[in-house]
Image (tube, coloured by chain):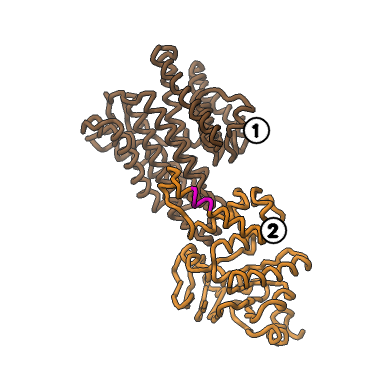
Amino acid sequence: MLMTKRLTKAFGGLAAVSNLDLELRHGELVGLIGPNGAGKTTVFNLLTGIYLPTEGEIILEGESIVGKKPYQITARGMARTFQNIRLFDSLSVLDNVKIASHWHSSYSLPSTLLRLRSYYQGEKQMTEKAIELLEMFNLDDKKDEQASSLPYGEQRRLEIVRALAAKPKILLLDEPAAGMNPLETKDLMALIEKIRELFDLTILLIEHDMSLVMGICERIYVLDYGKVIAHGTPEEIKNNKRVIEAYLGEGA
Amino acid sequence: MKRENLLIGILLIVFYAAVFFATETGLIPPYYQVNLYLMGINIIAAVSLNLIVGFTGQLALGHAGFMAVGAYISVILTMKLGQPFLLAVLAGAAAAFLVGILIGLPTLRLKGDYLAIATLGFGEIIRRLLDNIDYVGGAAGINGIPKLTNWTWLYIFTLLTIFIIKNFVNSTHGRACISVRDNEIAAETMGINTTYYKVLAFSIGAFFVGIAGALYAHYFFLIQPATFSFMKSFDALVMVVFGGLGSITGSVIAAVAVTFMNAALINFGTLRMVIYALLLVIIMVFRPQGLMGTKELTFKRLFGGKERGGSANVNDKTSD
């Protein structure tokens, strides 16, 4: 479904990601882990088109997406969340979700300016779909609140809802459990499993919380200094010597 | 909601008729009439700039340049080509729209201060070009422009500007613009073509200030390139910031207030600009988010507080 070939991104002389070969098959839940600064978020930025790769290919459903703009890649079925939450702060919770449906449910500019029937229909449809999604995540009672006024955990959840509203086939989650306590993390795990089935999603997830990664991922890639140092099932990764070294240092 | 709209409609018509009657019978002396027209023109300029700076978050300072385009093109059409006024105004606005796209495409790649300086430069380029085109009188400009802007046209175009921009902002397209302001990277990854929306907001803003230019030219008899210096852009920016970045009603109130302030201070001679500046500083110290912030004056609020003048009635448009 999604494949990268020898994907490389260099900032000056530093290769943040080098020769990355990644593969996501339909319906999989794959984890991307590694120490701080290993290049995980850079991988996400490459996949979503925020960065242009220095070298290599990114193939989404048989087609190269290198050089495509982020909004074009979104329209091909990829959506993401951010490590440092990036909501539209001044907008309401509902409007945040509605924006993500803009690319597939927009109505024309003339009908907007003249308030034709298609404007009202379009708005109604967008609102209904957005509320439906918010209900699933228990955020519907806060739909009129300003996004920035939500507590941290709910902001994280709203980001996931917003990404889902973009109708992705592949969902990229950048540290969804960051800043959550063990109980919240557990809820989140259940939630991720649920949305994967409900929305028929393929998920790639960056995470530091090992209980979460080991608990739900089917395959894991371990990144260190921009290179894949290990890759396999959670069991294999747990016992991999290089991974333990990367995390704990040599001799551990 | 329906009843509210009806009431707003009636209020708007009553206000129109009252002012029409007052100007025809001389209840409002000519000197005050000038300010009435300036208010309308300033409202259009401020609301259209707010779409660019307030809603889309692009600090652009070339607004006077687009006003000049609208003014000159419309005057050429009425004076040199003998076309009707309405056509001239719309052609002036359309020309400003096209120039907006041409200037917006390269400059809107820039952000913040860089965009401000680039658009400021483009505004000045338009002025310098006009200085050197003999067909439009060079630096001396064009005078003897027929006075075709009347209260009816002014009122219609002011309302139209507010209505269209309000409709734009309260739609998925408007939300796309706001998302660009709030977080450009997130907007782009949520499927918003940010370049398209930045250029769109920019050129829609140019379109309406082009109308303001055409109305201005056909009221004040004379236009010169110097009329459209960057000070005009700053005036509009002052109104937008003063009224609240991202509030249409705020821009309307600010445009009325600033015009009123300028007129009221005229007797103070050279002290006028000092007092004006001081007032602005004081307002910014006590309300840094502007009069309205990002909120709109709604029908309910209007009846809670006291707002004088027709511009406040115009504001109700945003309440539905």
Which label sits in the foreground, 2 or 1? Answer: 2
Query: Which image quadrant for residue B159?
Result: top left
Residue B115 at what x, y percent from top left?
Answer: 46, 49
Q: Is residue B1 left or right of residue A67?
A: right
Q: Nearer the viewer, residue B284 or B158?
A: B158
CA gap, disc 2 to disc 1? 39 Å
Q: Is residue A121 magenta?
A: yes
Instruction: Decide if residue B195 is on the left or right side of residue B82.
Output: right
**Which label was assigned to residue A138?**
2
Q: Which residues are magenta?
A: A120-124
In the image, residue B57 sits, relative to residue A14, either above or below, namely: above
In this orientation, which residue lies closer to the viewer: B185 or A173? Answer: A173
Instruction: Check the image and report above or below for A210 versus B309.
Output: below
Question: Horizontally, is A119 left or right of A252 in the view?
Answer: left
Q: Please tell me whether residue A180 is drawn above or below residue A126 in the rendered image.
A: below
Within 10 Å of disc 1 (Cα), the crowding (few <14, some 14-19, many 20+) is few
Residue at 58% in and 32% down = B299
Q: Are marks 2 and 1 on the same chain?
A: no
Q: Is residue A20 visible?
A: yes
Foreground pick, B117 / A213: A213
Q: Residue at x 56, y 79 (%)?
A: A24
Please name the residue shown 71% across and 78% down the image: A214
Q: Is residue B23 magenta?
A: no
| Drawing shade for chain B | brown
Residue identifier under label 1: B286
Q: Position of residue B266 (x, y in %)?
A: 48, 18
Chain painted in orange in the figure = A
Chain hosting mark 2: A
Residue type of the residue flagged with mark 2: Asn
* Residue B264 picture location, percent across and down: 51, 19
